Image (tube, rainbow, N blue to C red):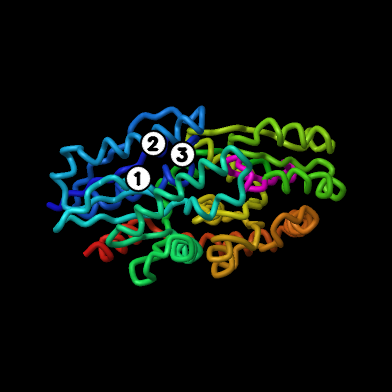
Amino acid sequence: MHKALFLTTWPLSLGQGSGTALFVQSIRRAVEGMGTQVELVNPPLDMQDYARFTLERLWYNVQFGRDPRLEQVDWVLGLDYDGFAIPRRSGQRFIGTARAVFADLVETEPEPFRTLLQTQAFFEGHNLRSAERVITPSQYARRKVIEYYQVPEGRVHAVPNGIDLAEWDALWQSLAEPEAARRPTVLAVSKLYPRKKIGVLVKAVPIVRSRFPDVEVRIVGGGFEWHALRQLSREIGAESNITWLGDINDRRQVVAEFKRCHVFVHPSIQDAFANVCLEAMASSRPLVVSEAASMPELVRPAGSGSLVPPEDPEALAQAICDLLANEEKRNRLGRAGRRFAEGMSWENTASRFLQLIG
């Protein structure tokens, strides 16, 4: 049996770790299901203070380069910059996977986070340039890895994330059907980072409310902008139409939010792979997303929603209203998204991973 070691210093709770946590847990199960034994290394670091968290991640990596477990595996998977201090050994493959592309985040965040991201990008570039293979979750992320880190094109491969539809559908079936007469409901699931542009959605709410006075916008996720976004919603009079749910670790509760909504919205301008868009498709819900980053790679071929100009509240509001007003269109786009999601399994992702590793 082949043995692998997965190294990530990113938190693996779904509430804190978001899409990366989902990727690690899902790809591990799928790879193990295909006959590879996986040693998962994930130190319990506290991310409440982002600066300290970043330094602890870097220091853990420095120390881990001497860990004896490395001598017992056939290949190593390092996420983002994790693994930069691991000696590259003859006969042991080191595979890098870029889940974020830190260099691509730098211009989207204010200080002090910008400097911290630049630091992480430096180590990520070193890590990926010295990897035998680099695997990204989208063509968008692949292009950014090549552009920012000068990794040779032939070593960088795009393998999209998957979704566990059996698990998703089981949770869906365990939930009661939402009331047909419920308020028009819009859902966003996102960490509250500047690049996710939830503020654009907040600014769109009064415009949507002018046509749908009782609209409810439900926002799942916490993050750096929690207080600023709450303040913005109060200043523009949108607070009564927004429900702030914070981080949710219970997978069943997340599925319940998708089942409850009429339209799913993702106004982000930077995502290496938007897992939440795939979850909306699995839920047969139509999407409104920014025409940016990896979102067009999912939504356009699926035919599952509308793409709008980034950072444009009026365009976002218009697309939301168009879907809220047209049940037939919502159902048609929802069915198209579901068909697309049915071809996106974690088993397919794991199979492609192992093919690339050889």
Q: Are marks 1 and 2 in contact (CB under 8 Å)?
A: yes
Q: Nearer the observer, disc 2 or disc 3?
A: 2
In the rendered image, the quadrant that contains the C terminus is bottom left
Residue at horizontal 39 percent and vertical 32 percent from the top: 56
Q: Are marks 1 and 3 in contact (CB under 8 Å)?
A: no
Residue located beneath label 2 in the image: 57
Residue 4 drawn at (x, y percent):
21, 49
Closer to viewer: mark 1 or mark 3: 1
Query: What's drawn in magenta, residue-wise?
Result: 181-197
How packed mark 2 is, by other alpha carbons closer than 10 Å (few <14, some 14-19, many 20 or more), is many
At mark 2, the secondary structure is helix
**Which residue is disc 1 drawn over?**
82
Q: Is residue 5 left or right of residue 325?
A: left
Can residue 340 be seen at all in this image of the molecule? no
Of labels 1 and 2, earlier in sequence is: 2
Q: Nearer the viewer, residue 183 or 186?
A: 186
What's the amino acid at mark 3?
Gly
Residue 17's tag is: 3
Q: Is residue 128 above or below residue 336?
A: above
